[in-house]
Image: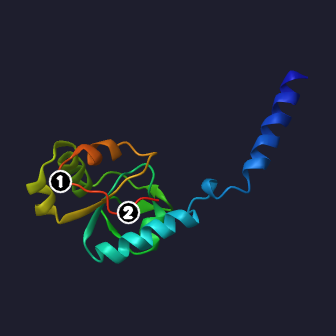
Amino acid sequence: AIVVLSSLMATGAMARLWDHEEILAVAPGDVEVGEHLLERAGNDLVYAEQAPWGEAMVTVGLNVTVGVDLGVHDGPTELHLRATQAVLTDDVSTLEELGVRWAISSPHGALGWVLERSPWWELVHEV
């Protein structure tokens, strides 16, 4: 009886979440952020964390350091690994060599605090 009750409660909770856009693979807010960044960055390379960003950034046409496949990271690339190391260590010369002029982060990501404390990055747009 406890298992059945727990299962019903979990199903009810999932049904209530169904209408929230945050559970979508590509939420309208993600596309809005991507389009805004595309206006500013153009064809420049954009450093994107692996975890929170995926299909939305590629869908709008951003040139990102991380590859995606159906919205999921398709494995680390040499470019992304080098860019991540450069972001973590404030290695501006490597970022310039790679052509990374922009970065996108999220409260759900792991590197927002690194970008925030760095003197080389500035907040351009916050949603």
Residue type beneath disc 2: His
* 111 in relation to 55, above or below: above
Query: In the shown orientation, is residue 33 left or right of residue 93?
Result: right
**Alpha carbons under labels 1 and 2: distance apart:** 16 Å
Residue 6 locus on image (x, y percent): 82, 29
* 41 in relation to 49, above or below: below
Residue 15 locus on image (x, y percent): 79, 48
* 14 in relation to 66, above or below: above
Residue type beneath disc 1: Trp
Residue on which the image places disc 1: 120
Query: In the shown orientation, is residue 127 left or right of residue 65?
Result: right
Residue 25 is drawn in which quadrant?
bottom right
The N terminus lies in which quarter of the figure?
A: top right
Q: What residue is shown at x 36% (from left), y 52% (from top)?
A: 49
Residue 64 is drawn in which quadrant?
bottom left
Residue 112 locus on image (x, y percent): 34, 46
**Mark 2 neighbour density, 10 Å: few (under 14) some (14–19) many (20 or more):** few
Image label count: 2
